[in-house]
Image (cartoon, rainbow, N blue to C red):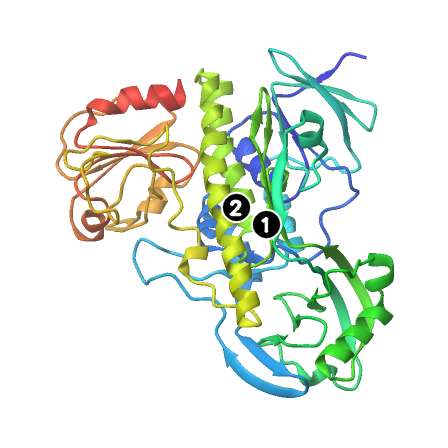
Amino acid sequence: MDPEHTEVLIAGAGPTGLVLAIDLARRGIPHRLVERSGRTFPGSRGAGIQPRTLEMFDDLGVVDAVLADSGPVLPIQNWDGRRRGEARPLAEPAADSPGTPYRTPRMLPQRRTVDILRTRLEELGGSVEFDTELTGFEQDADGVTATLGTGATVRARHLVATDGGRSTVRKALGVPFHGNDVTTGRAIVADLVLGGPDADAFDTDHWHMWPRAEGGLVTINQLPGATSKQIIAIFDDPGRELDIDRDATPEALGRLLSERTGHRLTVHEIHWASVYRPRVAMAERFRVGHVLLAGDAAHVHPPSGGQGLNTSVQDAYNLGWKLEAVLRRGADDTLLDTYDEERRGIAGGVLGLSQRVFRADRADGGFSVRGPETHQLTLGYRGGALSRETRRGLGPDAGADAAALRAGDRAPDAPLADGALFDAFRGPHFTVLVVGDEAGAVPVPEWVRVCRVPAEGYVKEAYGPGVFVIRPDGYVGLAADDVAGVPDYLRVVGG
């Protein structure tokens, strides 16, 4: 049989694969999104959504649905057996600033996030091919030939593996996956229906936690929109091997919760459960020829700090516009090397943060406060191949204030007379932002928009006068005093 053809084949329909498919769909790039299971992810894992991801969701057209269905990060209610302890906030908001429209993280079960993303993909004409496993692939100088469990053969220019931490694509490529366990113990996370005489002891306004329970920490909370409770149980015994069929039954979890909390509890039903060992790991490289790794296939995080899902979907957001530039606008194929450079740098830093948060949790005996460093708003690509800072006095060796906006940083929002800067940035295009009285003409191709604003108010404070090329993923690519360098920069990023 002749192979079926597409331009991008995406293996894995979790949040990362769905975000990439949405971005490609709105750009008109033919793609296929295949998923080996028969349905989307059913559990609540990956519930924390950071402010930077909310900005991405705004651009992709799903933020209203996410905000409507999600809730704030609940404060912690500590317990010592049946005795209530202190209640305290878990997450700090970002600083109040016109540049940050979304200041607080949100909580939403991952299954609902996936449903929202899938609905958006279908609105754009895309779909998920369920019960369709990628069983093998070969690549050559021009692309990838993949075989599917359905018996079909697919020819694609690029294969993107978003198939999870145990990625079969990564293993087939032979890419080393370096990492380590952050604790010797194991953990269970489960969505379940709680019963028993004391089931009503836990209000839905707090994340209930027994940080010093014998055997290990245990938590109970209810996520927004869920009728079930989410529980997390850490097992301190390094020799305790967990088996989901034995340790995640209603009887076993009911017994565990009763013993660790001192309350009389039973478990009526388990909707979803997972056994895991908290660990960090990262692929040695994110690109091998025409195959790219993204999300958990490229890096895995412990759940502390809510970094895993957010870092993963930002991989896809970084990659989508680069695939379009190469496939549609004649950009050099080496542009895809910047995906590896930029996202491996980010993932490495975030993995370090996840480990620090996990260790602080263990030292604290529960969950430590999640500060603004977890919001992902300060992550960026300063010094990278696509970050050009040419303003006088702000070059890389000028010793300028490190807090000042520089090429490679996230482009902040700002109020305008007729809306906000994010209104101008929203969409799959590049934006040339001219702040001030720069009068030079800016001839740009159709995939670039020009936005001129006066150097006043918060725009002047955040950007200063100058000319800025804003990438489709919301980062400053070029920061210059005038428009002279814009055409050359656009040739690099768009062909």
Relative height, residue 77 to residue 461 (above, below): below
Picture coordinates of residue 114 (x, y %)?
A: 64, 49
Q: Nearer the viewer, residue 26 or 400?
A: 400
Q: Residue at x 50, y 46 (%)?
A: 61
Numbered label attached to residue 301: 1
Quadrant location of the C terminus in the rendered image: top left
Left or right of residue 259: residue 296: left
Q: Nearer the viewer, residue 105 or 251?
A: 251
Is residue 412 shown to the viewer in this render? yes
Q: Nearer the viewer, residue 255 or 114?
A: 255
Relative height, residue 357 to residue 401 (above, below): below
Picture coordinates of residue 97 (x, y %)?
A: 30, 59
- Distance from the alpha carbon under mark 2 to that under mark 1: 9 Å
Q: Residue at x 37, y 56 (%)?
A: 101
Task: Classify residue 222 by image quadrant.
Answer: bottom right
Q: Disc 2 designates what residue?
A: 311
Is residue 123 shown to the viewer in this render? no
Q: Are marks 2 and 1 in contact (CB under 8 Å)?
A: yes
> Which amino acid is tagged 1?
His
Which residue sits furthest bottom? 83
Task: Classify residue 83 by image quadrant.
Answer: bottom right
Is tag 2's residue or tag 1's residue first in the polypeptide sequence? 1
Quadrant location of the N terminus in the rendered image: top right
Disc 2 secondary structure class:
helix
Picture coordinates of residue 225 (x, y %)?
A: 64, 65
